[in-house]
Structures are given as structure tokens and as C-alpha cells.
Amino acid sequence: MKLSDLPQHGEFWKALPPRDQGDENPDAVYLEVGKALTTWEGVEMLFAMLFGIFVEATNPAAQRAYGLIVANAVRRQIISETAGVFFTIHKVAKSFIDELDILMNHYSLASNRRSEIAHGTVMTFSFADARNAGSFLIPPLYNAKKTTAFWTKTREEDKYFMMRSKYRYTSEDLRIFIVKFGALQQCIMDYTNRLSSAHPQPPQASFGSPFL
């Protein structure tokens, strides 16, 4: 998959509208949370490899240093800064520069969805009529960015209004994000392969022990 195959980043990574019915079994949500976060780590690994190309690393040191950066915003910034130097030194075609801007926008918005998944909690709802409304992944109430301080809807507008949450995901919703994370992986790989072909790099040293 190429970057041009993805819809506009703002639309592609929008939070999904909340469903009225959750999963019958909360384990279904837990399972997809694990799959989503594992898939996301593939995204992070590929960006670390791209960073290695931009700094023209010939050993694992650069990627390991990159891995110490926790904040996604800082990772994006360091990729952009090192890319700018690489592009100038190697007189890289403008098409690669423009594509990286788009790729970083996808990375930024996708990381918001990843954070919702990583910092969500699974909750099962039931109502006064004893009807099981199912299980969802929702933000904890202390998460000020993903919840509201006060009720913003009525019971008639949203029967889950008391949770004050800005997202509510089922296992099906999470599977949608898993597919999108996978698509982003493919786009990074395609970009990296084409950039490496256009500007070959020296081979990296073995990742094995230097004492062998």
C-alpha cells in the first residue's frame, strides 16, 4: 500500500462514533486492545528504522537512542529535523519531502487513537431494566482530555451520558483501527524502500554480539 492510497489523514483517523450496544463478552474488547497495541508497535519500529536512515546509522546505536524518547511529539520532531538534514545533503526529490510531511501528519493523528486504546479501561454497562448493554473501552474519568467535567448530554440523547466520555469503542471499532495501523505500516515500508533505493545507505553492522 502506498501513501496515496490512504484517505486524507484528518478523515482517516477520526474517532469513531459511539455505538449503542457493546460487546457481550468483555474479553472480546481486551483481546482487540492487545492486538491494536501490538500492531501499533510495528508502526513505531518502522519509524525508528526510518530515523536510522535519516541519520545514516551504520550500527544500532541511533535506533536505541531514539527508543529512549517516549513522547510521540518529540519523536515526530526528531524525525523531521534529521530528515531535513538528510534531504539537503543528498538533494532528495521534493516528492519525498512532501510525502514525509503527509506521513508525519498520519503518524500524529494515528497516535491519538493509539493513546485512547492504551489508556482506556474496559467497562460493562447494565441498566435498571437489567438489560446488559455490553462492554466498551472508555477513558477513565480522571483523563481530563478524553472526558468532560460535567454531563453534556441527557439520558435521552445518550444512555451512557453519566460516563462523560469522549469515546466509547467496541471490539469491532478496535479491529477497524488495527486495519488502519496495519495500512500505516505498509505506507511507511513503501516510503522507506523507495527512499533507500533512490539513496542507498551503507550496510548496518551486525546486531549480534561484537565479541563473537
Image (cartoon, rainbow, N blue to C red):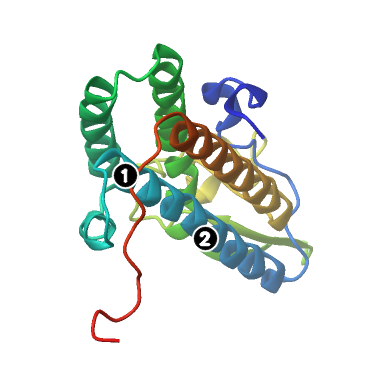
Q: Name the residue furthest top.
A: 94
Above or below, comparing residue 101 to residue 180 in the picture? above
For marks 1 and 2 on the same chain, the one whose residue lies earlier in the sequence: 2
Dot 1: element:
helix
Work out which quarter of the rendered image holds the N terminus and state it.
top right
**Residue nearer the viewer, 167 or 159:** 167
Mark 2 surroundings within 10 Å by alpha-carbon count, few (fewer than 14), some (14 through 19), many (20 or more): some
Q: Which residue is mark 1?
A: 51
Please count the marks in the image.
2
Residue 144 appears in view: no
Residue 39 horizontal/vertical position (percent): 56, 57
Who's the residue at 45% across and 40% down the image? 151
Looking at the image, residue 188 sits to the left or right of residue 171; the answer is left
Q: Position of residue 140 (x, y in %)?
A: 42, 58
Find residue 171 and report its horizontal and vertical position in percent: 70, 57
Q: Nearer the viewer, residue 44 or 195?
A: 195
Foreground residue among 55 and 173:
55
Query: What kind of residue is marked 2?
Result: Leu
Three-letter amino acid code at disc 1? Answer: Phe
- The residue furthest bottom is 212
Residue receiving disc 2: 37
> How many C-alpha atoms fall within 10 Å of the one at disc 1: few (<14), some, or many (≥20)?
many
Q: Residue at x 24, y 54 (%)?
A: 66
Position of residue 182 in the picture relative to residue 93 (left or right): right
Closer to the eye: label 1 or 2: 1
Quadrant of the image containing the C terminus: bottom left
Residue 27, compared with residue 174, is above or below; it is below
In what element is the residue under mark 2? Answer: helix
